[in-house]
Image (cartoon, grey):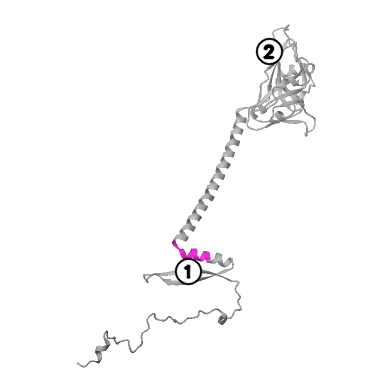
């Protein structure tokens, strides 16, 4: 097997590759360009109707002439050129090194059979971590020719001979997202991010609950240790409701500790403020008129009535 040199390629390829341009010669290989059709696996294809146009038509403008291959996704790319491989030769295909370094891998095979005529379809896979943008007319692939030891009678005569487009039958089983280590990692990152957000939210609610419990504990302690404070709070509340508090101080039974707020009387503030003090009701002291059950005269209080009055007149 003898590989064709750059000089032999320049001599032979104008009859084998159309359209041919000499600027695409690269040492002992030729650069093939991205053509007018492409297919990329995406999540959006799962929600689309079965009769949707799965194959994207690439235009010549920047707005419609590019596709994006996300990490972990497959794509079918049609070449711009028609390729012919004579019966006494074989062709090798690959991707340019710059795209390999980005993670784009050729998974469609590595050779073109003798007797092939038509456009090539490259099946590629993005094994990188970032999306790869591919544009129409971009010199993306490489083809290398080599002589066989003779003219072979075993040449390609399959159904794909003279192909000019991507067949929908080729892509009908790839109308969904292709799961890959990178896509699984992306989903795992999303789950971890959601869990982290939930954990932050949980900590915030725990902090709020702790603050509420602390405030309740402080309030209970204040009402327990300082009863006067609770009385003041009640006084403010009743005062706001339109009542006036009158407190009375008294002494405890043992005569030692003063009892503050022992009596709380709520009086309506709506009492007529113009009422004179002398018009208020005054308590009336009533004299006791109780008559003793057994009245006794003052002169006879100390006298004792003799049991036998007739003997008192007798002389001794």
Of residues 299 and 112, the one drawn nearer to the viewer in this rendering:
299
Q: Is residue 182 above or below residue 117?
A: below
Q: Quadrant of the N terminus?
A: top right
The total number of labels drawn is 2
Q: Which mark is residue 263?
A: 1
Q: Is residue 232 left or right of residue 92?
A: left
Residue 176 figure quarter: top right
User: N-terminal of the two: label 2 or label 1?
Assistant: 2
Q: Which residue is mark 2?
A: 2
Furthest residue in direction bottom, as rendered: 315
Residue 78 among those drawn in magenta: no
Disc 2 vs disc 1: which is toward the camera?
Answer: 1
* Secondary structure type for disc 2: strand
The magenta segment: 225-234
Percent across and percent down for residue 120 are 74, 19
Q: CA distance from mark 2 to mark 1?
A: 118 Å
Q: Are marks 2 and 1 in contact (CB under 8 Å)?
A: no
Q: Quadrant of the C terminus?
A: bottom left
Residue 227 among those drawn in magenta: yes
* Secondary structure type for disc 1: strand
Q: Is residue 153 above or below residue 102?
A: above
Percent across and percent down for residue 237 are 55, 64
Q: Is residue 241 left or right of residue 302?
A: right
SS assignment for the magenta stretch, majority: helix
Q: Is residue 128 above or below residue 278?
A: above
Percent across and percent down for residue 198 are 57, 42
Name the residue located 44 percent from the left edge and 61 percent from the top edge. 225
Percent across and percent down for residue 18 are 79, 20
Name the residue located 52 percent from the left edge and 50 percent from the top edge. 209
Q: Is residue 279 left or right of residue 143?
A: left
Name the residue located 68 percent from the left edge and 13 percent from the top edge. 2
Name the residue located 55 percent from the left edge and 44 percent from the top edge. 202
């Amino acid at each position: 097997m003898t590989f064709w040199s750059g000089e032999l390629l320049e001599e032979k390829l104008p009859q084998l590759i159309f359209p041919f341009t000499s600027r695409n010669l690269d040492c002992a290989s030729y650069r093939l360009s991205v053509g007018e059709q492409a297919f990329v696996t995406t999540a959006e294809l799962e929600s689309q109707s079965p009769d949707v146009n799965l194959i994207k038509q690439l235009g010549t403008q920047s707005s419609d002439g590019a596709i994006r291959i996300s990490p972990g996704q497959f794509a079918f790319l049609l070449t711009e050129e028609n390729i012919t491989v004579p019966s006494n030769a074989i062709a090798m295909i690959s991707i340019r090194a710059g795209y390999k370094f980005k993670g784009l891998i050729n998974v469609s095979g590595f050779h073109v059979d003798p007797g092939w005529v038509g456009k090539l379809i490259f099946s590629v896979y993005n094994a990188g971590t970032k999306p790869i943008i591919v544009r129409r007319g971009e010199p993306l692939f490489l083809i290398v020719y080599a002589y066989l030891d003779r003219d072979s009678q075993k040449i390609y005569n399959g159904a794909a001979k003279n192909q000019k487009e991507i067949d929908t039958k080729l892509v009908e089983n790839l109308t969904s997202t292709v799961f890959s280590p990178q896509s699984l990692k992306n989903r795992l990152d999303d789950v971890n991010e959601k869990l982290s957000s939930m954990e932050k939210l949980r900590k915030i609610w725990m902090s709020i609950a702790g603050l509420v419990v602390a405030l309740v504990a402080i309030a209970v302690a204040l009402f327990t240790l300082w009863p006067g404070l609770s009385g003041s709070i009640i006084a403010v509340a009743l005062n706001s409701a339109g009542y006036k508090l009158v407190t009375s101080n008294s002494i405890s039974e043992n005569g030692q500790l003063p009892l503050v707020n022992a009596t709380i009387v709520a009086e309506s503030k709506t009492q007529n403020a113009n009422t004179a003090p002398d018009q208020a009701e005054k308590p009336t002291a009533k004299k006791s008129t109780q008559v003793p059950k057994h009245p006794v005269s003052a002169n006879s209080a100390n006298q004792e009535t003799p049991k036998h009055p007739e003997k008192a007149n007798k002389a001794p």
